[in-house]
Image (tube, helix red, strand yellow):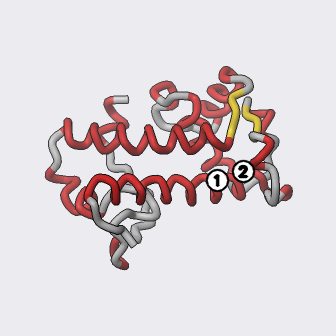
Amino acid sequence: MDRMLKRSPCVGICSTTYGDLVCRGCKRFAHEIVQWNGFEEGQRQLVWQRLLAIREGTVRDFLQLIDEPALRSRANALNVFEADAYDAFNLAYEVLRRLQRRPADLAEVGLGLHAHQKQGLDAENVPRALLERIDREFYQRSVAHYERSFRTLAH
């Protein structure tokens, strides 16, 4: 986990360039992106902890863990960086990211979809459609966190 916390959460899709106060890619706040290279390790760790906690809660609301050893095995097969350091739900997110361009059965990777999440899901490519939903919700929760923390609207 220490190696993971030292790298940037950036995913190469920065919307703060266009005026967003919360990045639609990595979900960091604009000031965190600008100041990242100057942050001390403790500051970076706090940002990572917030991002992982919000993402974990979001993924948990969409997915259920059926078989953690199967999930971890698939994560290793997909070369998820620092897979052992992730909790199961953040690991599930990383696995979905790598499966988004190929059809996959969630049960094969040790996951199940909550019944209320099945409605309107693209059956042709469940990982990609699910990841898009999770990312939208993750972004909304990050914006809410920003607005609560800084008492200003992010939109």
Give residue 143's quadrant in the image. bottom left
Question: The N terminus lies in which quarter of the figure?
Answer: top left
Q: Evaluate if marks 1 and 2 touch, with contact meaning CB atoms under 8 Å apart.
A: yes
Q: Position of residue 137 (x, y in %)?
A: 56, 55
Q: Nearer the viewer, residue 103 or 68?
A: 68
Q: Is residue 42 above or below residue 11?
A: above
The residue under label 1 is which amino acid type? Leu
Q: Position of residue 62 (x, y in %)?
A: 67, 43
Outermost residue toward the bottom? Answer: 18
- What is the CA distance from the residue labelled 1 to the residue labelled 2? 6 Å
Q: Examine the rendered structure and indicate whether residue 9 appears above or below residue 75.
A: below
The residue at 45%/27% (across/down) is: 85
Q: Which mark is residue 141?
A: none
Where does residue 122 sit, x and y in percent of width and height? 81, 60
Q: Most extreme residue toward the right, as rendered?
A: 123
Kindly state the secondary structure of the residue where label 2 is placed: helix
Q: Residues within 10 Å of mark 2 (few under 14, many from 20)?
A: many
Q: Which mark is residue 131?
A: 1
What residue is disc 2 on? 127
Q: Say what secondary structure mark 1 lies in.
A: helix
